[in-house]
Image: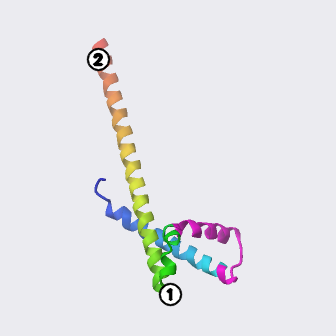
Amino acid sequence: MKKINIHTYIVTFILLYVLAAICSLIGYANNAGTLVLTPTTEFLLKLHSIINLPTDTIGYVTLSKGIYSIVGGLILNVLLYSLVVERFVFCLKALKRNVLKSKFVIKKSKRAILLIEK
């Protein structure tokens, strides 16, 4: 695993944390029965189950009750997803770099062939 791009990781963490906080608030409002369903809230409610997946499956929130366990679980989820997104961005950049490099080599070899034929 190559060096992690800390800028991408922090930006991803902040964006995902805001999204996770909004989804969690919508999820808890749905559990309390006070949520007004619109297409946006329905989408965010479905996203809530995906964002809370790792810590909800291992039962992190049931270990301790309170706001600290909820925020702690949310931070653990966001840390994990931020790392996954950062690695995905790294792979895309590496793939793009390799494709551009191979295109440059192909163009260079075509020019060399044309020069040889002349």
Mark 2 Cα within 10 Å, few/some/many (few <14, many 20+)?
Answer: few
**Above or below, 4 relative to 55:** above
What's the residue at 58%, 79% (across, down)? 25
Mark 1 belongs to which amino acid?
Gly
Query: Which numbered circle lies on residue 115?
Result: 2
- Residue 41, x across and y down, in percent: 66, 72
Quick one: label 2 or label 1, which is nearer the N terminus?
1
Residue 118 seen in this snapshot: no
Q: Which residue is denoted by mark 1 in the rendering?
A: 66
Q: Secondary structure at mark 1?
A: loop
Pointer 1: residues within 10 angstroms few (<14), some, or many (20+)?
A: few
Q: Secondary structure at mark 2?
A: helix
Image quadrant where residue 10 sits: bottom left
Rendering coords of residue 33 (x, y %): 70, 82
> Is 49 part of what is drawn in magenta?
yes
53 lies above or below 24? above
Quarter of the image for the C terminus: give it: top left
